[in-house]
Amino acid sequence: MKKINSPDKLIEWRRRIISETPSYEKTIVISSGTCGQASGSLQIIEAFTQELEKRGLETKVRIKITGCHGFCEMEPNVIIYPDEIYYIKLKPKDIPEIIEKTILEDKIIPSLLYQFSEASPKVSKLREIPFYKKQMRLLTGNNIEINPTSIEDYVALDGYQALSKVLFNMTSEEVIAEIKNSGLRGRGGAGFPTGRKWEICHKVDSDVKYIICNADEGDPGAYMDRSLLEGNPHSVIEGMIIGAYAIGASEGFIYVRMEYPLAVKHVMTALEQAKKFGFLGESILGSEFRFDIHLVQGAGAFVSGEETSLMASIEGRRAFPSQRPPFPAQKGLWGKPTNINNVETWANVPLIVNNSADWYSQIGAETSKGTKIFSLVGKINNTGLVEVPMGITLKEIIFDIGGGIKNDKKFKAVQTGGPSGGCIPKKMLSLQVDYESLTQAGSIMGSGGMIVMDEDTCMVDVARYFLNFTQEESCGKCVPCRVGTRQMVNILTRITQGKGEEDDLKKLEELAMTVESTSLCGLGQTAPNPVITTIRYFRDEYEAHIKRKSCPALSCKDLIIYYIEPDKCIGCMLCKKNCPVGAISGIRKEVHIIEQSACVKCGVCMDVCPSKVKAVSKYTGRKKDKILKNDSGNRMKK
């Protein structure tokens, strides 16, 4: 295939791809992103391939390998078309039965279907699953239809049509106006209007300009950018080319962390394909526009996600942030005007160009347009990637899409925006998810991490954990961040150890204000958010730790003890056999005892005990029973 050197040739190629695609009776779509492969999708692919070859069905049944479908909790999963049958948590031993019954006999296998609870019906189709019903999968929906290593799959779904439209029917100014009118805001964290950022860079007079895709996704539990790059890399590349045309750049960079090997592999393949077929390089699609993209792998430093640090890393320098102004749009990479957007922002651009700014601006909230992808993790039943319209409530995401809290526990809080985000309490579940509402609540949108916490979560320890993360990831360049965060971590650690003092809350609040207002970059400026919000919404927990030396959640190891109730112990020895440090003594059919000086508070004894091991607050005597479910799914105390 030669280079596509005109819009007509692109349309012709698309028609040829569709017409020449072999006809199959059935198609088996296998989710195989990083989460899928970690759960065994490669073994599922191999089992399907071998079974189809064994039965001589290769010409009748197609296997399509795609990126993540979002429902990570159910990996490995497949969708079988044309009936759209959805099977979950597969094992290689399931494959012969699927071929025999579903492929050859058109029968559904109930044991492989999704079922939320024993009381709910089993679901055979993807669109019927509650996890997907309230989503609006504009960016991630094509992951089901595209093999990420096939440019033909992308072109068949109108890929690069937006680029063709821009190059031959729109001026740079018209492209920028379209993005501005759409209301698209940067999905990397701050939510700065994308069109305005492009306009600033476009107006700067310079013979050289750059654009950068920020894929340095470092938030714990976040993997939105990784999923897009793994599942649909051409959407990001097309968005970058359009952005380059708008601002007048001839060179671009995708900066992705090397901990994403599958994303790196798929991006490199996509870049090679884009160059081969004329979407990158000289005279793109036969126009006068030239542009190329380079892939740069970061070493994994969290601070590299800050745009000035990222540019320093690309230049070969240490990832230190720089004072602003000047902003990158004025003086960025190698001193030249540079536009930086994150993966999700770039992927939105072709959608807007193809469907119009008016279409896009009708989706979402008043000041936050479009959809947002979140990684929904933590104490939640349905873990995965969710794409929802801006303005949806936290309650809808957590309970309607996420399926509520695991083991029928009570919801306590949700942290949005990664380690620099704030913790939002139960009383604010009706909060709309948009930039302004989250900021007003003391949190941030961030890149899209969403961590759900239940009643057993200690909010003081949560603040300590996240602040410890940002403190360790601080580059150390400025004193407020380097020293201030360390002092805050030290105070929080003392509090969780029962060594808190009366004026610690005042010290934390003063330090948080100083670090927030005087740090050089966004890492330090947002690092105190978990502390500020947990003190605001969960002050009683801090006071319990400080005044009563008690952890209400029975989570802080230094403030709890585990003990065996003598009148309930049956001497089964399960606790003794499973204790990792040998802290339990006793013989069969006699009462066992936990040696407190040797106990490491791991809780294994309480998990395995069939009778009665309890956790109790060391100072207040509050007890915590092991909670199980009986056969009917109801809560019971053991």
Image: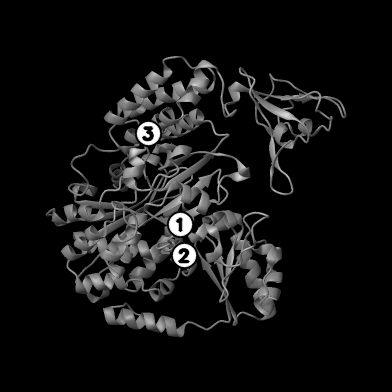
Q: For the residue marked with disc 1, what is the amino acid?
A: Ser
> Compared to 582, does 210 lie above or below?
below
Taking the view exactly as shown, the residue that stands out farthest to the top is 502
Nearer the observer, 590 or 251: 590
Question: Looking at the image, can residue 180 be seen?
Answer: yes
| Circle nearer the N terminus (2, 1) | 2
Residue 527: numbered disc: 3
Q: Secondary structure at mark 3?
A: loop
Image coloring type: one colour
Taking the view exactly as shown, the residue that stands out farthest to the left is 205
State the image coordinates of residue 521 (x, y, percent, origin top left). 29, 36
Residue at figure coordinates x 40%, y 41% from the top left: 301
State the image coordinates of residue 536 (x, y, percent, origin top left). 40, 29
Residue at figure coordinates x 42%, y 61% from the top left: 136
> Mark 2 to mark 3: distance in Å?
34 Å
Q: For the residue marked with disc 3, what is the amino acid?
A: Ala
